[in-house]
Amino acid sequence: MKKITITNAYTWYNKGDAGILLGIVNTLKQIYNNDIEINILSFTPEEDKKRYCQDNCIKDVYNNILNPHPYKHTKCGKITAVIKLIFRAIYLYFSIIFNKKRLIEKDDAFKVMNDCDIIVVCGGGFLGGKKYDSLMHVFQIWANTKMDKPVIMMGASIEPIKKKIIQTLTEKVLKKVDYVYARETITYDYLKTFLPAEKYTLIPDMAFMLEDKKEEMDLIKNIKSQFDVIFGITVRKWNFPNLTISASEAMDNYKKSIAEVITKYAKEKNAGFIFVPQVIVEHGDDTQTAIEIRELLDDKLKNNFVILNDDISPVEVKQMIWNFDYFVGTRMHSNIFATSMGIPTVAIAYEKKTNGIMETVGLQNYIVEIDDITPDKLFNKIEMSLNNDETIRNNLKVRISEIRIEIMNKVSKVFSKL
């Protein structure tokens, strides 16, 4: 039996990140014919354990070695969390260097890393950019490399790095990793600048490997009976770091653009829009943004925008999306779920990773940038999607199959040697 520890997992309440994790698990189960035992290091271990351990191959869930959660989302609370992280990192650093054996005996996370055969760094977009919180993940990866186990990064995105210290530390640690799978071309091209060619490759996002469930859902069936066409939609709060105008002004523009498009299709096509609960984590719940958009609609059209906020699994989110006719997604992984199910999709891109993902599935012409979104731009992209409906569906069917074969081939090639 192969023992694997997956680190840097985020939380069940972000269905995209949960989809990445479960996609990795599904892939490993295929490679090792279910003869595996998996432990997970997560930011919300108590909640995640209830869900993930329903899979017989997943033994337990523990804390990531650096974990700010839970903390008070106030200025004072955030400062306190940062201070605790710094002291924790200092303690762990010296423990790893000078007394690793004792650390392994005392700390469950280090124990499962020490007892496993392979350490897998869960994919995601947590590296790079200009935020120092990426260093929390870099430290976890560094600790992984000190456990004398093969360390594989599965489906990483590294945002363009804006601060020299973040770049230096990130590159130094990644050079110690045994293999890196980049999930889009921006990260792949960046890895070329400092890693030898035999230590990395490009694969699509691991969420493409999440299980498909193509069944009608009674809830969606009842909603569909009221409308002639159904759009699924995800939205989110964003801070617009690249704009000079205030984030609140830019958010107002984003919400108004979506509200005007909903209004137009509701009036002209008797369309219904269903908000998909993609991220429902406290202090990051997308539902609030959806409610604010709904409030912008005329009273007689509010019923055309249905807000769902159930805590369902990533597989059930995909199942829900399969019941829609079209999809408009701001959350990147909701677009992966939609395209995986063959649904014509228009993406609202808030980071470059979205552009990379849409290029992967051949939908690079169906993107609206969140920074300069307008009702007309969004409407035109959706119209283009509707007009090319059959072609998009046929192309997605072929492309998703190719993507999954590519992932299996490239992952199996590396893991078969471990």
Image (tube, rainbow, N blue to C red):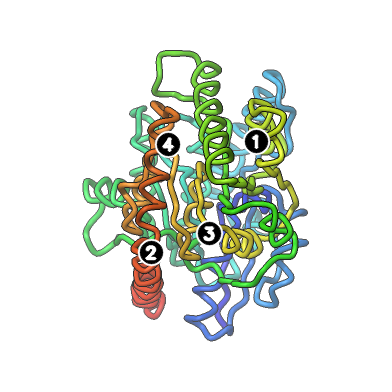
Q: Which mark sits nearer the N-terminus, 2 or 4?
A: 4
Q: Which mark sits nearer the N-terminus, 4 or 3?
A: 3
Secondary structure state at the residue bearing disc 1? helix
Give the Cα separation between the discs numbered 2 and 4.
Answer: 20 Å
The residue under label 1 is 290
The residue under label 4 is 378
**Amino acid found under the numbered disc labelled 1:** Ala
Give the Cα separation between the discs numbered 1 and 4.
Answer: 17 Å
User: Which numbered marker is on residue 390?
Assistant: 2
Quarter holding the C terminus is bottom left
**Amino acid found under the numbered disc labelled 2:** Glu
Which callout, 2 or 1, points to the residue nearer the camera? 2
Q: Quadrant of residue 376?
A: top left
Give the Cα separation between the discs numbered 3 and 2.
Answer: 28 Å
User: Which numbered marker is on residue 265?
Assistant: none
Q: Which mark sits nearer the N-terminus, 1 or 4?
A: 1
In the image: residue 36, left or right of residue 386: right
Marks 2/4 in contact by CB < 8 Å: the verdict is no
The residue under label 3 is 20
Q: Quadrant of residue 108?
A: bottom right
